[in-house]
Image (cartoon, helix red, strand yellow):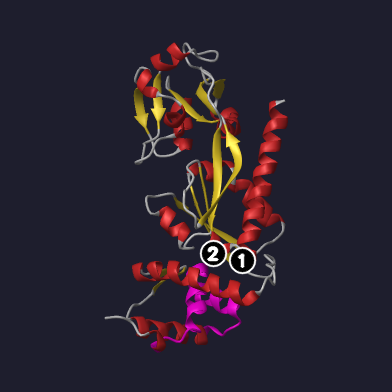
Amino acid sequence: MKLNLRSIDLNLLPIFEAVMETRQYSKAADRLGMSQPAMSAAIQRLRNTLNDPLFIRTSKGVIPTPKADILYNDIRGALSQLRQGLSQQKGFDPSAQPHDFRILSGDYFEFVLLPQLIEEVESHDFQIRFNLKPILEGSATQLIHAQADVMLDAFPIDDERIHCEVVTQETLVVVASKKHSWIKESPTIREFFKATHAVLPHRGRLLPLDKIIDTSQMPERKIGVQVTQYISLLAAVSRSEYIATVPKHLASRYADSLGLAVYDFPIDIPPINIYMMWSKVFDHDPANQWLLNQLRAVIKTIMKEESLTAN
């Protein structure tokens, strides 16, 4: 049965959004300047309209039902576009306006860029929360329909509805334990294929190494372990005779703490572009523009620090 939009009080939608983002009725009420009883009554009205509990109480607050999770993506995108149309470029003040940003990314972003982004937010007491989700098969659709604010990836989305900006470049390096029995300097290409490798799964698309090297003309790598995250590659290599190929900034950040040696790749390979992508729906959204500028600034700072360290 199709829901009649006229049967819904649209004033309930920002309330639903606030509860989804705070996961507590009291915090949602404070954000919107409502009393908690009024907040609870509003959610009950929405439950009755949508015929779903929407939120389940726990000792720490509430958790959304599967239907609430699905609704949130659509409601958040619609409210964002509505606010954009009504705000007429009033600007965004992260100190005064609580906001949740939805970022699609891999673990490279989480380990290399996210810590400094959080540090920047905390140092200014911004009322910001980041909600990170992994890049999956449907992530491009989420981005196109404004169900995510930004995506960071080595694989660009070719769609006229998406902005795609190169924000930095990465170099692939080889990592091995400093205690490795026979790799004591940058390996030759023969040594590279002789070694046992820790690798990531393909997940239906070429990995950066396979994109830039014609592996069909080379021996097949001997795989010792396949893991799900870059940080797991580093951990696996640190206590074994395995080697791995990883982004240079990730390797340099964790090499000392994990006892890893970082070596140049055995042949010359081009750098890998890292793309920042977002929907054109957000072109005039002050909050989204703030997020993009924060990411650009953090990336620039990290790359500058890494360059100074290398020199």
Figure check: 189 above or below 81 = above
Residue 285 disc label:
1
Alpha carbons under labels 1 and 2: distance apart: 8 Å
Tell me what residue is drawn at x 42 percent, y 53 percent.
Answer: 139
Q: Residue furthest left?
A: 1
In the picture of the structure, the residue carrying the numbered disc 2 is 281
Question: Where does the magenta region start and end?
Answer: 7-36
Q: Is residue 104 left or right of residue 298?
A: left
Residue 236: horizontal and vertical position, in percent?
43, 29
Question: What's the residue type where badge 1 is placed?
Answer: Asp
Q: Position of residue 77 (x, y in %)?
A: 49, 68
Depth check: give the residue in front, 281 or 173.
281
Residue 23 in view, yes or no:
no
The residue at 51%/79% (across/down) is 15
Q: Is residue 184 above or below residue 112?
A: above
**Residue at the image position 71 percent from the left and 55 percent from the top:** 123
**Which residue type does callout 2 highlight?**
Val
Helix, strand or loop status at disc 2: helix
